[in-house]
């Protein structure tokens, strides 16, 4: 048995580099400091980060947030925590979660793509008590999640088979969890972080945060706060609503005309890309929206698209789902365009047959 081996360390020997790594992690969690660690593949970073963090979390009643962007890394973290539990014969609670829509047994594929649509659906199902998964309480399911360290896939199928909402059950247990294995969004998306911390009754001061593969974090945040809208989505949405909603069809045609106007300006200046001011799109849209029979603001237009998508009768037809997808793409983009974050807003002709409007978060 190796001397100085932490009691939670589940392997018989410590690899080169792991001892120093664990010492650094221990000092930073105890001192409330930030540690940026760079180590080669294969030295066992996951276990070396988890052992001292978990030890300190148990001693101080804090919660380790193990944040990762990859399913494969969820699995590695959960398998490592199982080994620690088995080796140390220690009772601690670990919950593995992904996004709410990916854990929902009722989510259809379009909900996985458009969180706003799923969120509306889930909220109204909860409010009206129509979601039987949400209303059912199952102590046995909660107990099992508490006692076993379950991979999120197993947790979801177990809860679904018992008729309980996996996300709700997981977050209920997370209130008393020592470790939460979750996506970057759980902390780096303000809305999600606030909702989750409130649900599990923890504050930022109660957390020990491990960001796995943190070099991916800036790109991930940038992508989450950036978006693009292709002209083909606008055209597709307009065509799809031509016979069912003349007013909104007309508004979408006006948006298509704005694309054409920007394309002419870019071509006139012999540019593939031109900058677009935030107000340009908002004012151009509002100019036409005010003149319509059902006058509305830019925001009301985006909301009307969302309402149409929500009430969409897909009737199982793939063509209708394509229209719904296009309508939601336009609604989400119009919402995002007005973000207060510092963004670069561009009109691009790099795909000549499909001009694109986009905004990209700046560093
Ligand atoms: S409450 Fe749970 S099961 Fe019901 S719709 Fe929402 S996430 Fe899905």
Image (cartoon, rainbow, N blue to C red):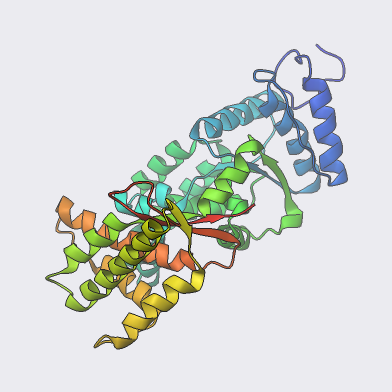
Q: Is residue 249 visible?
A: yes
Count of marks placed on residues: 0
Instruction: Locate the N terminus and report the quarter of the image it occupies.
Output: top right
Q: Nearer the viewer, residue 225 or 260?
A: 260
Position of 303 with respect to 203 (left or right) is left
Q: Is residue 117 visible?
A: no
In the image, farthest residue toward the left: 243
* Residue 218 horizontal/vertical position (percent): 62, 45
Occupied quadrant, residue 200: bottom right
Position of 266 with respect to 13 (left or right) is left
Q: Which residue is depicted at the point 64% across and 37% down?
A: 215
Judge whether 304 appears above or below 182 on screen: below
Q: Nearer the viewer, residue 359 or 98?
A: 359
Q: Nearer the viewer, residue 320 or 126?
A: 320
Judge whether 324 appears above or below 1 on screen: below
* Residue 86 horizontal/vertical position (percent): 64, 25
* Residue 271 horizontal/vertical position (percent): 43, 53
Q: Which residue is depicted at the point 55% across and 31% down?
A: 73
């Amino acid at each position: 048995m190796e001397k100085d081996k932490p009691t939670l360390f589940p392997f018989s020997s410590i690899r080169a580099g792991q001892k120093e790594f664990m010492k650094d992690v221990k000092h930073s969690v105890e001192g409330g400091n930030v540690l940026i660690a760079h180590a080669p593949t294969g030295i066992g970073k996951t276990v070396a980060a988890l052992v001292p963090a978990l030890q300190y979390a148990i001693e101080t009643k804090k919660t380790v947030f193990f944040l990762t962007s990859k399913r494969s890394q969820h699995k590695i973290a959960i398998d490592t925590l199982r080994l620690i539990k088995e080796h140390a014969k220690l009772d601690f609670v670990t919950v593995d979660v992904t996004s709410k829509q990916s854990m929902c047994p009722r989510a259809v594929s379009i909900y996985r793509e458009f969180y706003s649509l799923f969120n509306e659906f889930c909220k109204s199902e909860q409010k009206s008590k129509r979601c039987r998964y949400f209303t059912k309480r199952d102590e046995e399911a909660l107990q099992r999640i508490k006692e076993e360290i379950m991979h999120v896939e197993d947790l979801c199928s177990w809860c679904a088979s018992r008729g309980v909402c996996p996300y709700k059950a997981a977050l209920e247990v997370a209130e008393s969890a020592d470790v939460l294995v979750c996506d970057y969004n759980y902390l780096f998306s303000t809305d999600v972080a606030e909702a989750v911390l409130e649900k599990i009754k923890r504050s930022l001061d109660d957390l020990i945060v491990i960001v796995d593969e943190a070099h991916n974090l800036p790109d991930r945040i940038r992508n989450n706060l950036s978006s693009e809208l292709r002209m083909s989505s606008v055209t597709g949405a307009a065509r799809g609503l031509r016979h069912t909603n003349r007013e909104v069809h007309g508004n979408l045609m006006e948006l298509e005309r704005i694309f054409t106007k920007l394309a002419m300006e870019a071509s006139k200046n012999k540019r593939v890309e031109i900058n677009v001011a935030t107000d340009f799109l908002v004012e151009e849209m509002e100019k036409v929206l005010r003149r319509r029979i059902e006058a509305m603001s830019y925001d009301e237009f985006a909301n009307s698209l969302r309402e149409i998508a929500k009430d969409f009768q897909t009737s199982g037809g793939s063509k209708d789902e394509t229209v719904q997808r296009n309508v939601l793409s336009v609604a989400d983009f119009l919402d995002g365009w007005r973000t207060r974050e510092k963004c670069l807003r561009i009109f691009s002709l790099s795909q000549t047959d499909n001009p694109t409007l986009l905004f990209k978060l700046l560093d």
